[in-house]
Image: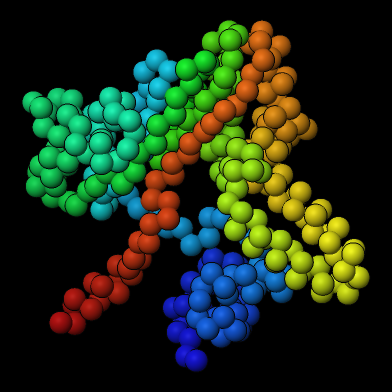
């Protein structure tokens, strides 16, 4: 089958594999990008990268908290110029505040009354802003975290103003101990989550299909060693444990102290908090995560315009 140069280029950028290997992988997988990535991994040419293929869209992540509840919202725009616009920033703040008064479901937030808008809904405020600012924008997603028996810690990476930035994280801790000490530890965990982007809190929360996919790839890699099936099974178990250490929050090496896991760090934090500490949930929003954004060659556009 015919494989385009753009497809080869995309796969190379996703995996770091060479041009010929990337083309061979696409041919072997019938042009299916996900299967091509797996083909390269099975050959030991590429490593798994949960961020592969993600491109950045513009806008802001907004954060708002009240009592035992906090929310993150992602509001997208066409350009970064709009993200630096004070009016747009205020809209994102107001949307986050409105989200706090809902159950955190996207449709409910869009229908909620937006602060500072004389009773207009969030959807109506966004529509008005499109006409005023002159760019398309949308509330893409909302996430809410609650901790009735503890605290919620927050962290905003690449912050451009209070509660606004490019990566937002909320971490819920269950504890009856000192709230300020718990929040201080929770903020460290939130910074850890921002840096490592774990797939799940515990191994049980990882999608079963994703685990089976990894096991299949590990088994194929192990068979290339020529070892007996009994040995291969043990090799797969070992690699699966390593996989969990890399992607499960509680099993990851804590960025503040890599000599202990996040779970062990929570146990250590109990000394300062004065009571048991349990991480019960987290959410992480990275701006533009998973959005396909067309990349254009500005110089080429200008040259084409000059010729026409």
Left or right side of 4 for 87: left
Left or right side of 21 for 130: left
In this orientation, does residue 23 appear?
no
Residue 36 pos. (x, y %): 57, 75
Q: Is residue 281 above or below residue 204?
A: above
Q: Is residue 14 above or below residue 137?
A: below
**252 vs 23, nearest the viewer:** 252
Left or right side of 178 for 43: right
In this orientation, does residue 307 appear?
yes
Residue 80 pos. (x, y %): 30, 48
Residue 148 pos. (x, y %): 47, 17
**201 vs 85, nearest the viewer:** 201
Furthest toward the bottom, the residue is 1
Residue at the (54%, 66%) spot, across then down: 14
Q: Is residue 165 above or below residue 133?
A: above
Residue 299 pos. (x, y %): 30, 70
Residue at the (50%, 91%) spot, across then down: 1
**78 vs 221, nearest the viewer:** 221
Residue at the (46%, 82%) spot, across then down: 5
Q: Quadrant of the C terminus?
A: bottom left
Task: Tell me the quarter of the picture where residue 27 sits.
Answer: bottom right
Residue at the (40%, 32%) spot, across then down: 144
């Amino acid at each position: 089958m015919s494989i385009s140069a753009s497809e080869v280029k995309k796969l190379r950028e996703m995996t770091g594999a060479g041009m010929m290997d990337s083309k061979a992988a696409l041919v072997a997988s019938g042009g299916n990008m996900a299967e091509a990535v797996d083909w390269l991994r099975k050959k030991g040419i590429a490593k798994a990268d949960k961020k592969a293929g993600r491109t950045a869209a513009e806008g802001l992540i907004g954060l708002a908290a009240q009592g035992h509840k906090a929310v993150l919202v992602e509001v997208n725009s066409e350009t970064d110029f709009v993200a630096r616009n004070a009016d747009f920033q205020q809209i994102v703040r107001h949307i986050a505040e409105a989200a706090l008064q809902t159950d955190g479901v996207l449709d409910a937030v869009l229908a909620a009354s937006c602060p500072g808008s004389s009773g207009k809904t969030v959807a109506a405020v966004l529509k008005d802003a499109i006409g005023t600012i002159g760019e398309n924008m949308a509330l893409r997603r909302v996430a809410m975290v609650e901790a009735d028996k503890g605290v919620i810690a927050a962290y905003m990476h690449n912050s451009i103003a209070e509660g606004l930035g490019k990566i937002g994280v909320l971490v819920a801790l269950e504890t009856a101990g000192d709230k300020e000490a718990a929040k201080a530890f929770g903020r460290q965990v939130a910074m850890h989550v921002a840096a490592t982007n774990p797939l799940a809190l515990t191994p049980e929360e990882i999608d079963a299909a994703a685990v089976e996919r990894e096991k299949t790839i590990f088994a194929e890699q192990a068979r290339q060693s020529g070892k007996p099936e009994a040995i291969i099974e043990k090799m797969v178990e070992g690699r699966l444990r390593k996989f969990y250490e890399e992607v499960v929050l509680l099993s990851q090496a804590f960025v503040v102290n890599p000599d202990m896991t996040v779970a062990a760090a929570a146990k250590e934090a109990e000394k300062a908090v004065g009571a048991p500490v349990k991480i019960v949930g987290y959410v992480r929003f990275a701006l533009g995560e998973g959005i396909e954004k067309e990349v254009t060659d500005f110089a080429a556009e200008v040259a084409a315009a000059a010729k026409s």
